[in-house]
Image (spheres, helix red, strand yellow):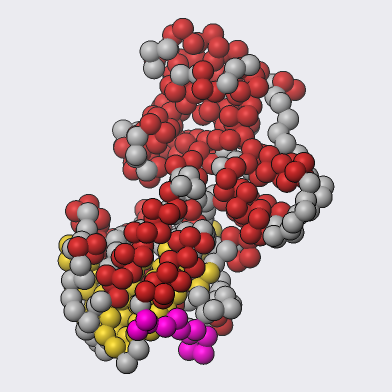
Amino acid sequence: MIAPGRRAAVEVLRAVTRTSATLPDALARATARLQDDRDRHLAAEVATGTLRMQAALDHVIAALSRRPLARLEPAVLDVLRATAYQLIHLDRLPAHAVVNDAVALTREAGRAAATGLVNAVARRIADPASRPTLPPRPASPIAAGAAGLSERDVAAWLDYLSITLSHPRWLAQRLLERLGSAAAEAWCRFDNERAPLTLRANTLRVSRDALAAQLAACGVDTVPSRYAADGLIVRAGHPLGTPLAATGLFVPQDEASQVVGAFAGAQPGEVVLDTCAAPGGKTLALAAALGGRGVLVAMDLRPRRVALLARTVALAAPHAVHVVRADLSAGAPVGPVCDLVLLDAPCSGLGTIRREPELRWRRCPEDLAGFAARQIRLAEVASRAVKPGGRLVYATCSSEPEENDGVLDAFLARASDFTLEDPRDRIAGPPIAALLDARGCLRTSPAQHGLEAFFAAILRRRL
């Protein structure tokens, strides 16, 4: 009998690699039928880990199957990747059970002719002595922007970053050129770590310290986040399984995302528009900053996203936020009446691949120009809702310059009535000030700060 968790993991990989399904959605569907928490945990661990380490696993599979991966049927490759991950990274699992299930899953997928190949490759992977070595870490470091380096040195680092540390080669090259080898390696290792669950206390209802105490009473151990003033990092326990999860006292939200909400700097009495608001974490931070005084409108377009936003708001801040469905690309929903407009722009998401490992394989460098063009258009539309003296906060969860500085400079070149503001003198606390670059933009870094890569800038409209 095939272990239910392994079957679900392969189902998730099939959905993510062959459709546009996100990893969380695919996991939710595949594990809904599982009754045992251990099976759900195994499915999540195998699917997520396989997507993170896909390039390294593919290197091993190609060598041991003695054929290019393009010659393997997709269903067979899904099984081999999940099997390789378990045998290499989850050594607590009995190897014979993993191999036997790999053969059974191949037959179950209607690929009986490939069972001999799968059995042979899986057995070779199970034997550490039979596995090929991965590209080693080069001894010679490379500095950021270094010129005149030998092609061999660069190629060695790219092999290591793209295969051993499992990042697309084009992205590894960008990181290497921008950051140098030490920071690029730290960045890639960060992306391959398991992301902790981070919560934001709903300070409309509870302080961070009081929330930590209530969670502790429910068996959840937390520590304060370093940069986000309202954040708690979960060290042990399952807060989403406690009675507190239904009270609206907290929302799960990445620490870097929490910092963006604080950086926006909403003030009591202001009129605020959150233009791409779902799932609602930043919306609640804006609501808390307003403190019940002012107006906050949160909008999004897709019905499922709006429904998610509405549920978040209804639970945590039912009287503080007006939720509307609107298409920002069709025009600003209001005239120039807002003190603050937050544009958390749709982007490549390449700053969040620790939490969304599939994005590293879905994006290509050619995508970035399209994202940037859309972001510039949305920034121009969103700016029309900003009143004179008000501000537009442009934010992304991308690491790439085209979507960050490139969009910022293009917008400023077109919008002569806006200027870039350096908020260093009024920013909320030294921790966030430490995240500002020379221009006053918020820029979080996996290598430097241990945070996902987010970017934000404040654009002030002249009076």
Rendered residue at 50%/10% (across/down):
115
Rendered residue at 25%/55% (across/down):
305
Give left or right: position of 157 versus 305: right
Give left or right: position of 90 versus 340: right
Q: Residue furthest bottom?
A: 463
Give left or right: position of 272 versus 446: left
Residue nearer the viewer, 226 or 243? 226
* Residue 373 placement (x, y as % from top left): 37, 59
Q: Residue furthest right?
A: 139
The answer to whether residue 38 is above or below residue 275 is above
Where residue 156 sits, quadrant-wise, is: top right
Residue 211, visible in the rendered structure: no
Q: How many marks?
A: 0
Indicate yes or no whether the magenta region holds residue 425.
Answer: yes
The answer to whether residue 382 is above or below residue 132 is below
Residue nearer the viewer, 315 or 184? 184
Residue nearer the viewer, 146 or 84? 146
* Residue 309 placement (x, y as % from top left): 25, 61
The answer to whether residue 98 is above or below residue 188 is above
Image quadrant in which the N terminus is located: top left
The answer to whether residue 234 is above or below residue 107 is below
Residue 370, visible in the rendered structure: yes
* Residue 136 placement (x, y as % from top left): 75, 39
Rendered residue at 51%/29% (across/down):
82
Where residue 448 sits, quadrant-wise, is: bottom right
Rendered residue at 38%/13% (across/down):
110
Residue nearer the viewer, 112 or 95? 112
Segment colored magenta: 416-426
